[in-house]
Structure formats: structure tokens, C-alpha cells
Amino acid sequence: MVPGLRREAILASLDIDKIFYLEDILKKFDMISESTLRRDLKVLEDSKQIELLRGGVIRKIAQNDSLIKEENDLDIDVKQNLNIKNKEVIAKYAASLIEDKDVIYIDSGTSCSYMMQFLENKNIVIVTSNVNIIEQYRSVSNNIEIISVGGKLNRKLGSFSGPITENNLKNFNFNKAFLGTTSINSTSGMTTPDLAEANKKQIVKGNSNKSYILVDSSKFNKFAMCKVCDLNECDIITNEYVDLLDNCKSYIIAK
């Protein structure tokens, strides 16, 4: 089979929002080698039709299609293996904005989780609902105090949320807050599939002197059910410029 037809056949075998592993695709296309398949997948990723994960692929609709409704977040174990370099660049820049004696909030999400590796020498207080931040407690400097807001644990997201979390957050004021988001587009602004996560982010944003939303470019021009805020309310830290950023309150392209 010629490469173009083979890649079309691979795309046809992938349903939107489902993950397939290399072994499964090799079984389906048993006439091609693993090295040939990997080359095909790389071409499809470069054309922004799929995203490659460790050991597998996920179908991605092309950017010139209509906005994608992301009804469900991916599991945290999957998301932490996506766009790692971009997320680390974003997280490193975000960490550089933090000053000694700041009280900060670090939200759920993988980009926010990566911040911890860049905070080693900071004398700060971190308030968080992010389980990964709490799990990194033993590996950080003794100068960092970590406060968990508690609440109902969403295992899929690795995040505390719900009424207990919201009531606890109302008691804190933050110098800076670093928020995650599932998606961003020019019409709906920042959105997430989970209402409890959206409520939590809104409370934090209202209690912070400065709020930043950490979002890698794979989340642009997508939307989900629950709104967090409009673009003109947002200070964005991302890794790539797109036109919609001009409608934001401010934005930073981290390098």
C-alpha cells in the first residue's frame, strides 16, 4: 500500500478522543513494520492530525476544522506525557515570576505540576488543590510551606474540588495564582469540562492580586462546557503565539 493511502487507513481506524496503542495498530495493519508505522505516525503528527503519546497515539482533528467540544478531560496519567517540553518551558517562566515571601496558589493540571522543579530556592507558601504538588513535598526546600485545601478527590484529574475545597479557598488571599485550563477559544474564553474545577478557579482568581493561566498551544481553539473567565480577564503564559491571544488581558510567550 502506498504511504498516502496507508496513512488515510490509519486515520480511518482512529475514533475521536480514543487512545490506541502501537501494538493494536500493528495488529490491524499486520503488513507493515513498526518502523514504517512510526514514520507514518510522525507524518500525521506533523500535519496536526494526531498527537503521539508514549507507546500510543490519540486522534486529533485538524486545526482548520470547527472548534472541538472537549466533553471529558483525559486522565492525569495520560496528560502528563503530552507536550512535556512545552509545559516545562511554561512552568519555568511561571516560577520565575514568584518572589520570596509570596503566598501563591498552584492549580490542578500538568503544566502547573511542573512548576515545583523550578521553585527549589524560594521562600514561599504554596496553597494547592493539586495532588502532584503535595506528593512532591518531600523533594522541595524546607523554605517552602505547602497547604492543601482538601476536599473531594477527583482521581482522574489528581485534584481536590467541591464545596469543602471552595469554602477553604475563600479564606485565602494570594499574591499570585497559577491556574490550569482544559481549553481556550476567542468566543468562550477559558473553559473546562468540570463545573467544580471551574468554580474553584473563579474563587482563586477573585482572591488573587495577580492570576496567570498556564496553557500550552495544544489547547487553543477548543472549548468545553464550563466557563472559567473571558479572554479579556486573563493573563496568559503559553509557548506559541496565535491570533486569539491579542484579545487577552496580557500574554507571555515563554521560551
Image (cartoon, rainbow, N blue to C red):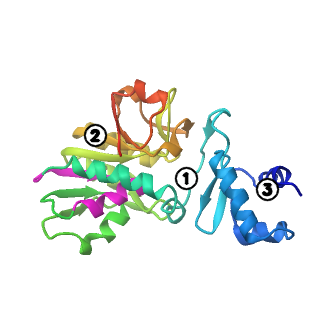
Assess disc 2: are there few (<14), some (14-19) or many (≥20) residues with their C-alpha within 10 Å of its C-alpha: many
Quarter holding the N terminus is bottom right
Q: Quadrant of residue 119?
A: bottom left
Q: Which residues are magenta?
A: 100-119
Crowding at dot 3, Cα within 10 Å, few <14 / some 14-19 / many 20+, comes out as some
Q: Position of residue 72 (x, y in %)?
A: 58, 50
143 within the magenta span: no
Identify the residue shown where x is 52% and y is 58%.
Answer: 82
The residue positioned farthest toward the right in the image shown: 1
Q: Residue 59: in sight, yes or no? A: no
Q: Residue at x 17, y 51 (%)?
A: 103
Along the line of sight, the residue nearer the viewer: 222 or 107: 222
Q: Position of residue 59 (x, y in %)?
A: 68, 52
Q: Residue at x 66, y 48 (%)?
A: 60
Q: CA distance from mark 2 to mark 1?
A: 23 Å
Residue 54 location, x and y as percent? 58, 67
Q: Nearer the viewer, mark 2 or mark 3?
A: 3
User: Which residue is tagged 3?
Assistant: 10
Q: Image check: 243 left or right of 203? A: right
Camera-side residue of 109 and 62: 62
Secondary structure beneath disc 1?
Answer: loop
